Amino acid sequence: MTAKNVKVKILGIVGTPIKNGNCQFQLEAALKQAEDTGQAVTEMVHLRDYKFSFCIGCDKCMRNIHKIQAKVGHDVSPVPIEGYNCSIKDDMEILHAKMTEADGIILMAPVYIASIPGQVKTFIDRCRTFVHDFRLQDKVATAMTVGFFRNAGQDTALDLMRTSLSALGLNIVSFGAAAVSTRDGLGVPIRETRFGVQEDFAGSVMMSIAVKRLVRMAVLIKAGKMALEEAEK
Ligand SMILES: Cc1cc2nc3c(=O)[nH]c(=O)nc-3n(C[C@H](O)[C@H](O)[C@H](O)COP(=O)(O)O)c2cc1C
């Protein structure tokens, strides 16, 4: 593969208790746009399909990281962790593997009381190892949300997701994208469709911008790394 025909892997993670809802619809549209660039392959995971529990704050992930750093040195980044680094054996193991294999991540969650659903926060907490092991350092991420109203918590939900993704060591691309699932964002459900979000033109424009930038930055990072490896040969 040359830097010219680099393809990146974009992982879309949707966190809502609702299957086949507006968030899933919007994320599927985003991933299709990513594929349409011709430079991305995509995968979507719905957190509802995975069973995982709260972080118990045992610090085992950090102790493992410190043990490895004591051997290899504290300036080695990413920390060479083999496999899953969490004391709780559940489906987070699958999700961690998917995250470490991706070049770019889209985190999508609905606005819940000007924030995100608890499941998504639990998912983020369970990713603590990445804060300290830097395994996501060469990947990009963006956040997306869908709410009932135009200005009723989208910004705070997006901000929370962006900051969390950044804390996990990811490079954040764009503001992210907010959309509404009601007509004109006025809180009145659209009777004719289950997917009101598809009527939100402003929301789809925001989404396109975020997707294009995400794919571009993921490609640039991957191509840059390939070029560096080539130069060091
Ligand atoms: C518990 C709960 C809290 C919500 N809080 C907000 C809110 O603060 N602001 C908002 O605009 N919409 C809020 N909503 C509406 C959802 O964000 C909206 O219905 C969204 O389309 C849900 O996405 P989904 O169809 O993928 O589940 C809330 C919904 C629920 C169930």
Image (cartoon, helix red, strand yellow):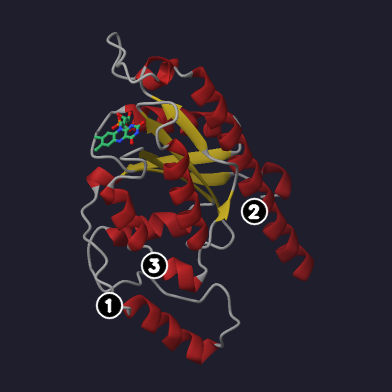
> Residue 214: x percent and y percent?
59, 42
Helix, strand or loop for disc 3:
loop
**Which amino acid type is shown beneath numbered disc 2?**
Lys
Q: Which is more N-terminal, label 1 or label 2?
A: 1
Q: Which residue lies under the disc numbered 1?
A: 58
The verdict on label 2 being within 8 Å of ligand 1 is no
209, 152: nearer the viewer: 152
The picture quadrant for ligand 1 comes to: top left
Q: Which residue lies under the disc numbered 2?
A: 222
Q: Are marks 3 and 1 in contact (CB under 8 Å)?
A: no
> Residue 149: x percent and y percent?
38, 26
Q: CA distance from mark 2 to mark 1?
A: 35 Å
Residue 233 seen in this snapshot: no
Few, some or many C-alpha atoms within 10 Å of disc 2 (few <14, some 14-19, many ≥20)?
Answer: some
Q: Which is more N-terminal, label 1 or label 3?
A: 1
153, 78: nearer the viewer: 153
Name the disc covering residue 189, or none.
none
> Residue 48: x percent and y percent?
24, 44
Helix, strand or loop for disc 1:
loop
Q: Are marks 3 and 2 in contact (CB under 8 Å)?
A: no
Few, some or many C-alpha atoms within 10 Å of disc 3 (few <14, some 14-19, many ≥20)?
Answer: some
**Which amino acid type is shown beneath numbered disc 3?**
Arg
Query: Which residue is painted at 32% across and 79% down in the image?
Result: 60
Residue 16 seen in this snapshot: yes
Few, some or many C-alpha atoms within 10 Å of disc 1 (few <14, some 14-19, many ≥20)?
Answer: few
Q: Is residue 117 left or right of residue 233?
A: left
Q: Residue 212 appears in which quarter of the rendering?
A: top right
Query: Which residue is painted at 65% across and 46% down in the image?
Result: 217
